[in-house]
Image (spheres, rainbow, N blue to C red):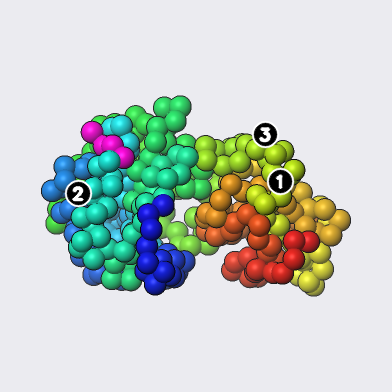
Amino acid sequence: MDKLSPSDEAELERIMGLLDTIDIPAATRVLLEIKEVMDEAGVTFFLRQGTCLGAIRDNAFIPWDDDIDVGSVIGLHGLSEETVESVAQTLRERGFLLRIEHLDYSLYVPMVKESLRIDWNCYRVLDNAVFMYPGIRIPVHLLTDLKEIEFLGERFLVPNPPEEYLEVKYGPDWRVPKQAGDYEEDVLAGIPDTTAPGRAGRLKQLLDRIMPRHTATVMVLDQEGQPVSGALISVAGMGTSRANKRGVVRLYLSRVDFYALVVKFDDHRGVLFVERIGPGQSYIYRPGEEHLLARDGAG
C-alpha cells in the first residue's frame, strides 16, 4: 500500500466509505480523463461491474450507481505491476487521490477525484479466471479478446461477449433494471459457498482460531434486540458460520476489506452487500439497520 499523508489518507477513506449516487456529469469527465491517461500510457482497461452494465444495457451510467468501475488483467495485453505503478503516478499528478493495495488476487487501486469513487482493479489470473467482488469467478476468456463499444462519445472496451459477462456477474435477469436492495440476491446466488482466492481458507481459519487477532465477531440480535443462538452468517466467497449461545458469530478475516454478508435466522434473511469489516473488531447485526454497528468488546 502506497504511503499517503495523514490528511490525504483520511480524505480517501472518507470518500471511499460513502455510497452516495454518482454525479453523472462529473463521472463522465473523470472516466474520460482516466481513458486519456490509460491510452497515452498504452494500458488496456475495460469497463466492469455497474459501469459495464450501464454502458451495455442503457448506454449510460446507472443513475443509482455509487462509483466508477474499471479493470485490467496483469499478464494480459502487456500489463505489468510496474506499468500500474507508472499510471498511478500520472493519475496522482493529474489530481487523483489514490493508493495501490497489493491483494492476493489483484492490485487494487482505489481513487477519488471530484468526490467520486473510482475502483481500478488489476486482476491476477488464478485457475484460468479472475475473481471479482464479492467472490465471483469470471472466466479469463471473457477478458482476453475485449470488445469495443461506443460510450460517452468515445470507444471503450468491455468483456467479450458482454452479455455472458453480465449474466455471470448479475444473473440471468441482468437486463431488468434493479436498484440497490434488489439486485444483490441475484449476485450472491451465483457464488458457491466455498473459499475464493484472497479469502481465509479452512486451514487459515483453523490457525486464526488459535490466533484470534484475525477474528471479527458479529452479535446477531432479533427484532426485539435479543441475541439469536444458532443464527447463520454467510460471507460471499468464504462460507457460513453459526452463532453461539450468546448470538455471537466469529468470522475469520485476513484484512480489513469490503464483504457481502447474508444473515439468516427463523424467517429472517438480511443482506449486507457492501460491508467494511476487519479482524479484531466487534459488530452488532440488528434487523432493519443498513449496516453492521460497531460495538465494544469481543463477545
Nearer mark to the viewer, of 2 and 3? 3
Q: Position of residue 190 (x, y in %)?
A: 53, 41
Q: Which mark is residue 238?
A: none
> How much space separates mark 1 and mark 3, taking CA atoms?
12 Å
> In the figure, 211 relative to 256: above or below?
above
Q: CA distance from mark 2 to mark 1?
A: 43 Å
Identify the residue at horizontal 65%, vertical 61% (top origin): 281
Q: Amino acid at mark 3?
A: Leu
Kind of residue sitting beneath label 1: Met
Q: Nearer the viewer, mark 2 or mark 1?
A: 1
Q: Is residue 177 left or right of residue 85?
A: right
Identity of the residue furthest to the right in this view: 245
Q: What's the residue at 28%, 71% (across, down)? A: 114
Regarding residue 220, the answer to whether it shows in the image is no
Give whichever of 264, 241 is nearer the camera.
241
Quickly name the residue at label 2.
38
Q: Which mark is residue 203?
A: 3
Label 1 sits on residue = 211
